[in-house]
């Protein structure tokens, strides 16, 4: 076996046997999706970009009720806030929980969403 093939085979064997967290100690070092389960049984998926891509991608991609909305960062007094004025949506997170609101009147759309 050629040295490059031997090295590739050894690398594959080592990485296949290693647990996933050992390969990437920071699970948020790349883009990731978080699933939330909200009151009433609704589910919401939110895709967050890799931290190093913060300026080149939307702050979040919110998928719910059959559509995906691109969200931008907005000021927040506590936690993290994302908005899309055209879709009239606001997504607020703090810790492992979040809620979705109508931006125009602050009415609650999804409440008490917890990472699933």
Image (cartoon, helix red, strand yellow):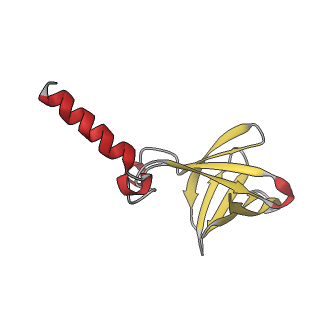
Which residue is painted at 68% across and 64% down in the image? 98
The quadrant in which the N terminus is found is top left
Image coordinates for residue 66, horizontal then vertical, percent: 75, 37
Q: Residue at x 37, y 51 (%)?
A: 18
In the depicted view, which residue is nearer to us: 33 or 25?
A: 25
Question: Which residue does the image show at 19% across and 32% down from the upper left?
Answer: 6
Q: Nearer the viewer, residue 24 or 39?
A: 24
- Image quarter hosting the C terminus: bottom right
Looking at the image, the residue that sits furthest to the right is 40
Say left or right for 56 vs 43: left
Residue 96, percent across and down?
A: 62, 67
Relative height, residue 93 to residue 35 (above, below): below
Query: Which of the 4 image quarters holds residue 113?
Result: bottom right
- In the picture as drawn, the residue positioned furthest to the top comes out as 1
Report the number of discs: 0
Q: Position of residue 32 (x, y in %)?
A: 51, 49
Which residue occupies the foreground of this view, 93 or 77? 93
Check the image and report above or below for 67 versus 20.
above
Observer-nearest of 80 and 27: 27
Q: Residue furthest left?
A: 3
Q: Residue furthest front?
A: 1
- 45 to the left or right of 39: left
72 with respect to 91 (left or right): left
| Residue 9 position by quadrant | top left
- Which picture quadrant has residue 109? bottom right
């Amino acid at each position: 076996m050629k040295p490059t093939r031997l090295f590739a085979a050894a690398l594959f064997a080592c990485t296949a046997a290693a647990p996933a967290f050992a390969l990437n100690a920071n699970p948020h070092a790349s883009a990731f999706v978080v699933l939330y389960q909200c009151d009433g049984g609704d589910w919401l998926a939110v895709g967050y970009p890799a931290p190093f891509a913060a300026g080149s991608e939307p702050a979040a991609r919110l998928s719910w009720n059959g559509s995906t909305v691109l969200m931008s960062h907005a000021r927040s007094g506590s936690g993290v806030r994302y908005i899309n004025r055209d879709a009239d949506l606001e997504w607020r997170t703090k810790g492992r929980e979040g809620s979705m609101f109508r931006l125009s009147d602050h009415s609650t759309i999804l409440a008490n969403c917890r990472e699933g």
